[in-house]
């Protein structure tokens, strides 16, 4: 039998496993789980925010890093003041555990043809999985939205 539990793992040369974190969109930080919908509900209640996407990059030999991506109303830029407002809203509406480490402004959230946010493919891209293995491009409604995440992956890799 095979035990499947939905975590990212690496099997070492010695046959042992290193567990890096969840492969689904549930976020677990400091022992507490939350569905991403709860974070979206908090963030998207802020008038300046049109849409959002959150991923938690767990493990990989270091601390977990929670990244929040927001699409803002036309003419609005992601200022330090707005970042603070977003983080405080998450802190109050969910828990301090789920305040993102970084907030980025993006043009649009990548979605499937059915309108679902591409949480897992974006997480996989940011963790270094090649684009063609991270997502079926034919199922993406706005593939140009993935360019930001490919560029960010390069920056994140360079900073490790």
Image: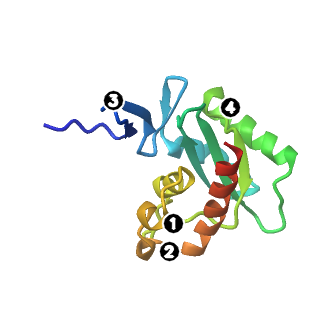
Q: Which residue is mark 1?
A: 111
Q: Give the crowd class for mark 1: few <14, some 14-19, many >=20 residues within 10 Å.
A: some
**Residue where numbered disc 3 is placed:** 16
**Where residue 108 sits: x, y (%)?**
64, 66
Nearest to the eye among marks 4 and 2: give it: 2
Q: Could you tell me which residue is drawn at 64 percent across and 50 percent down? A: 157
- SS of the residue under disc 2: loop
**Sooner in the amino-acid sequence: mark 3 or mark 4:** 3
Residue 127 drawn at (x, y percent): 53, 49
Q: Quadrant of the C terminus?
A: top right
* Crowding at mark 4 (Cα within 10 Å: few <14, some 14-19, many 20+): some
Q: Which callout, 2 or 3, points to the residue nearer the camera? A: 3
Which is nearer the N-term, disc 4 or disc 2?
Answer: 4
Q: Name the quadrant of the N terminus.
A: top left
Q: Secondary structure at mark 1?
A: loop
Q: Where does label 4 land, which residue?
A: 91
| Left or right placement of residue 15 versus residue 20 in this view | left
Do tag 3 and tag 4 residues touch (Cβ < 8 Å)?
no
């Amino acid at each position: 039998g095979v035990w499947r539990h939905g975590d990212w793992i690496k099997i070492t040369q010695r046959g042992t496993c290193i567990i890096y974190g969840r492969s689904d969109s549930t976020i677990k930080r400091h022992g507490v789980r939350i569905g991403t919908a709860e974070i979206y509900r908090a963030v998207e209640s802020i008038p300046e925010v049109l849409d959002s996407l959150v991923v938690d990059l767990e493990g990989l030999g270091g601390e977990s890093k929670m990244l929040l991506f927001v699409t803002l109303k036309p003419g609005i830029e992601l200022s330090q003041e707005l970042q603070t407002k977003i983080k405080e809203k998450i802190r109050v509406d969910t828990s301090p555990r789920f305040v993102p480490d970084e907030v980025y402004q993006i043009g649009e959230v990548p979605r499937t043809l059915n309108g679902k946010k591409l949480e897992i493919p974006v997480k996989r891209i940011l963790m270094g999985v090649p684009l063609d293995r991270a997502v079926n491009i034919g199922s993406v409604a706005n593939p140009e939205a993935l360019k930001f995440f490919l560029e960010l992956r390069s920056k994140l890799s360079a900073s490790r």
